[in-house]
Image (cartoon, rainbow, N blue to C red):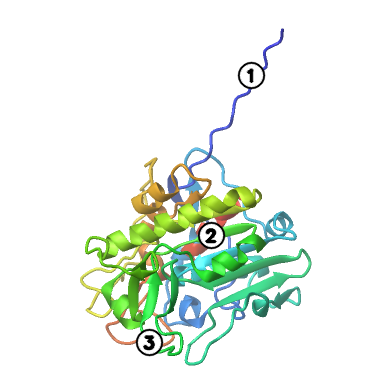
Amino acid sequence: MTVLSMTLSPVCNYAKGKWVLDNHSSFYSGFGCKRWLSKMWACRLTQRTDFAYEKLRWQPKDCQMEEFERSKFLRRMQHKTLAFIGDSLGRQQFQSLMCMLTSGKKTRDVEDVGKKYRLTRGKGTLRPNGWAYRFLSTNTTILFYWSATLSDVEPIDASNPGSDQAMHLDRPPVFLRQYLHKLDVLVLNTGHHWNRVKFKDNRWVMHVGGVPNTDKKLATMGSAKNLTIHSIVSWVNSQLPKYPGLKVFFRSLSPRHFVGGEWNTGGSCDNTTPMSIGKEILWEESTDQVAAHAVKGTGIKLLDITALSKLRDEGHISRFSISAKPGVHDCLHWCLPGIPDTWNEILFAQI
């Protein structure tokens, strides 16, 4: 009797590694990609003069990360749909990927299919609730849907859109429930809207089980966020048997780098020398414990970008923006090209 043994290759932990200098050009130009890239995130169009942050590449410690190639990505995603659902950092990752897939150039190969997903701009809103584009050559759709907290939000008084908003912590967004069956790759994220200011500005009222929340412990931001993340992960995981080809990722928290205050109280991030020089991420576990615990034991993967992004404080918008205001720094969002491109490289290596 012949005994066959098979050694399984260890799964690569892309979160472990270091940033290394790389003089290769970016996947797209910071002066271009105007069709996809918001001006406020295109740092090449601002007063900023240092762009060394574009010359670093993430190198995993124990494995080689597959090199991103536009044509390979589109072939791999032929006749498929990839959706980002989350907040403005999710939108940055979406815009980054669109720029990477088009090299930042205008192309007739891409058509707007937002109406197919009811992604429209409502009255009094600054922008649509999402975008969707299809690459004609491979029938590949890339979309983004705005859901800052990954919870279902609806007017408490349906006849009055200006009323308070019921925020159902234990219910996934309607969009996800309606379109999950059309998706092949899903990337979820949330994080920076879980604060009292955002709740007040958006008139969100926490609901659990379809009724206003009365549990004081659950009313804290940390507890509410934790419940929502676990709820959506649990719901999506319960749907996976119906869609065995669906790959789902929960992207970990993108770090902020405010020093000396917040965005409106003098906080800044003026550093232009990467903290990453000479440093290496060696932790096996994610520093985003909430997301890591939520996906543990499920069919959902963690797209762990927190620690590697934490080393890149020089990559933020900082005080440079198209509509820069004295004393106001953006140490939350990233310059593009920039760090979110790396998130997409890691995503590509896993789909």
Badge 1 or badge 2: first in the primary sequence? 1
Residue 283 sits above or below residue 177 on the image: above
- Disc 2 marks a residue whose amino acid type is Val
Residue type of the residue flagged with mark 3: Ser
- Is 36 situated left or right of 92 in this image? right
Residue 5's label in the rendered image is: 1
Q: Amino acid at mark 1?
A: Ser
Which numbered disc covers residue 187? 2
In the picture as drawn, the residue positioned furthest to the bottom comes out as 124
Question: What crowding class fits label 2: few (fewer than 14 Cα within 10 Å), some (14-19), or many (20 or more)?
Answer: many
Q: Give x and y (percent) for residue 202.
A: 36, 81
**Picture coordinates of residue 108 (x, y %)?**
76, 77
- Find disc 3 in the rendering and name its residue: 163
Residue 350 appears in view? no
Relative horizontal placement of residue 198, taking residue 16 as reference (left or right): left
Q: Quadrant of the N terminus?
A: top right
Q: What's the residue at 48%, 64% (across, down)?
A: 172
Q: Residues within 10 Å of mark 1 (few under 14, many from 20)?
A: few
Q: CA distance from mark 3 to mark 1?
A: 64 Å
Task: Give x and y (percent) for residue 255.
Answer: 36, 62
